[in-house]
Amino acid sequence: GENVEQHPSTLSVQEGDSAVIKCTYSDSASNYFPWYKQELGKRPQLIIDIRSNVGEKKDQRIAVTLNKTAKHFSLHITETQPEDSAVYFCHTGGFKTIFGAGTRLFVKA
Amino acid sequence: EPEVTQTPSHQVTQMGQEVILRCVPISNHLYFYWYRQILGQKVEFLVSFYNNEISEKSEIFDDQFSVERPDGSNFTLKIRSTKLEDSAMYFCASSFGLAGGVHYEQYFGPGTRLTVT
C-alpha cells in the first residue's frame, strides 16, 4: 500500500543554521505535497505546500522542493529561530492521507 | 478567518462505552476527515467523507467506528465500544477538496483528547 518515509526523526540545529527534512513516497499518483508544523499540544498547521507541476516553492525562510522522478520532497528552513522548534509532518495529499512519522526539530539559541 | 471547531476538547470515558466526537467543518468545504494521534506519535488517517458517504478509510477504521453528517454543519465520529487503545487525540479536518485533479489544503480542528479508562 501507500507509504511515506520521513527523515530524520529528530534534528537539532543551532539558531541561524539551516534545517532540511525529507519525505519519500510510494504512490506515483500523488500530486499534492504539504508540510505541516505541530507545536506541542496544538493542531497541525500547514506551512507550505507544492503541487506536482512545479519543482520548488519558497515562502520567506521556508522552501519545499519536489523530485517526482525519485518520489521525494523536502522541507528547507533557513536562518532557523527558536520558534521553529516543533514537530514537522509531511503527507501525500489525497483522500487517503498518509502522513510521515514526523521530525522533531530543536533549534538551540 | 474561518476555523474548524471540535467539541468536546477532552472526553473521559470508561472502556466499553460509546463516544461521539463532534466537528464543525469550514462552511464551504466539501471534504471532511478524521485523524487520530496517539501521544508522541504520528498523525494517522482514519476516514475521509464526501457527498454524504465515506470516500476512503484506513485499516484502523473498523466496525467500531462510524461517521455521520447529521445536518448541514456537524460531522461526527462515533466509537461504539471504546477500548483502552482508543485513547488518543482525535483531529477533524476539512478541505475544499479537489479542483482540476489537484487536492487542496486540509484545515485541522483543535482536537478532542479522548481518554479511555
Image: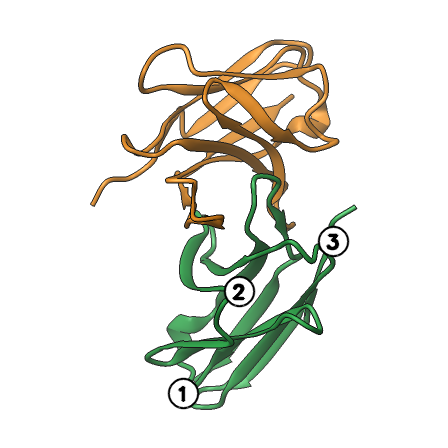
Subunit that carries the residue with mark 2: A
Mark 3 or mark 1: name the one nearer the start of the chain: 3
Most foreground residue, B35 or B39: B35
| Distance (Cα) linking label 2 and label 1 | 27 Å
| Distance (Cα) linking label 2 and label 3 | 18 Å
Give me the chain that's green.
A
Q: Is residue B7 visible?
A: yes
- Label 1 element class: loop
Q: Please state which amino acid type lies under the numbered disc 3.
A: Asn
Give me the chain that's orange.
B
Mark 2 or mark 1: name the one nearer the start of the chain: 2
Q: Please state which amino acid type lies under the numbered disc 2.
A: Ser
The residue pinned by badge 2 equals A52
The residue pinned by badge 3 equals A3
Outermost left residue: B1
| Picture quadrant of residue B28 | top left
- Label 3 element class: loop
Q: How is the image coloured?
A: by chain
The residue pinned by badge 1 equals A79
Q: Quadrant of the C terminus of chain B?
A: top right
Q: Position of residue B57 (x, y in %)?
A: 65, 30
Mark 2 or mark 3: name the one nearer the start of the chain: 3
Subunit that carries the residue with mark 3: A
